[in-house]
Image (cartoon, rainbow, N blue to C red):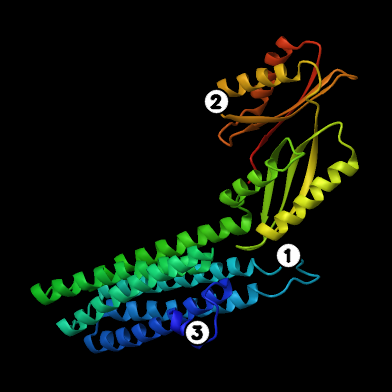
Amino acid sequence: MNVLYKWLKQDPENRDSVIQMTSGLGIVVNVLIAATKVIVGLLSSSIAIVSEGVNNASDALTAILTLVGSKLAGKHPDEKHPFGYGRVEYLTNLVIAILILITGVEMLQSSVQLVFHPEELQVSYVSLIIVAASAVIKYLLGAYTKKMGKSVNAPTLEALGADSQNDSFVSVVTIGSTLVFLLTSVSIDAYAGIVMSGVILKTGIEVLKNTVSELLGRPGDEQLAKELYRKIRSTEGILGAADMMLHNYGPQAYSGSVNVEIDHEKTVGEIYQVIHQLQLDIMNEYHVTMVFGLYAVGNDHDGVNEIRRSIAKYVREKENVRSYHAVYVDTANGVLYVDLTVEYALRDWEELRRDFLAYLNGIYPQYEINLTIETDFV
């Protein structure tokens, strides 16, 4: 492949180049396999082999869609889409899922008809060898495509790879039904076709579910969030960070927001210098447009560390409560501010609110407790 990259003047380190080259390889391989299987299937009157060929042809079409989707997703941001066209890749996945489902339904219909109206099979060990060879090729192609998809964070390539490897399983079923016929003269071709249609439909449903989940809005990339938190919390002048949100505009396009804890005695000018430089660093290193919110933290207040320890003790002992942050004591008005971060498994937030307020008021009755309960959005 490296030779091919050089010959076609493509950069193997560039995400778009990897998607285009891998998709192109899939198109060529699937077209060759599809043509071979359809010819062999027609000559042997095997619905299973013909169905496999049709499925391979649809794989070539999905590879073409991936190629086109990659081109559209790479369009430069404009006034209508200031964050770019990265989500086109998810729409491409949606179309791929629908095509896979259509193929599965059509195969199921043909196989059921064959159960009631069987046709005589004309198969040979030669056709068996052809199907076996295609199974090996498809498995290797699928493994390579998934590997490339993971290396450049391309869900469309990962979907193509999974579909290709499922085709290998389909081929194994076809080989099994053909061997049964050759050894016993009993045709289970129609039932093999039903099994294969089930595998194809399962793949289509999985791709559809993942794509719809992306379009509805999944949590941001967890590893990216960890790196961003580490970067932010290690910045001088920032005492803590929480409430990060990452909005996905494509596999490699994020905008986000995060709240940071700042010493309440810092001036606006001092805060600006820290935040502005951090925004630039995050954009350059991670390609994330980050907006910052501020929590004022007064570590110089008498007893604030004791308050933190009391809250930390509660968090450690309470199931489904992950952490706390934004602790601030407004001595002038007698208000104690604190945020609790909880797990999604916790359903009764009001019970937690009552329990926490009773706990903290029992220790610090002089303060009105201003509590915010939230989940991790990333």
Q: Secondary structure at mark 1?
A: loop
User: Tag 3: residue type?
Assistant: Lys
Residue 153: quarter of image: bottom right
Label 3 Cα crowd, 10 Å radius (few <14 / some 14-19 / many 20+)? few
Label 2 Cα crowd, 10 Å radius (few <14 / some 14-19 / many 20+)? few
Q: Which residue is mark 2?
A: 319
Q: Nearer the viewer, residue 189 or 372?
A: 372
- Return the x and y of residue 352 as percentages of the image width and height: 64, 23
Residue 138: quarter of image: bottom left
Whether residue 90 is situated above or below residue 27 in the rendered picture = above
Q: CA distance from mark 2 to mark 1?
A: 39 Å
Q: Secondary structure at mark 3?
A: helix
In the rendered structure, find residue 83 and report the number of the disc placed on it: 1
- Return the x and y of residue 269 as percentages of the image width and height: 90, 44
User: Tag 2: residue type?
Assistant: Glu
User: Tag 1: residue type?
Assistant: Phe
Q: Which residue is mark 3?
A: 6
Q: Secondary structure at mark 2?
A: loop
Which residue is depicted at the point 48% across and 73% down? Answer: 99
Q: Nearer the viewer, residue 30 or 185?
A: 30
Q: CA distance from mark 1 to mark 3?
A: 31 Å
Q: Earlier in the sequence, mark 1 or mark 3?
A: 3
Quadrant location, the N terminus: bottom left
Q: Earlier in the sequence, mark 2 or mark 1?
A: 1
Q: Nearer the viewer, residue 176 or 147?
A: 147
Residue 174: quarter of image: bottom left
Which residue is depicted at the point 28% across and 73% down? Answer: 136
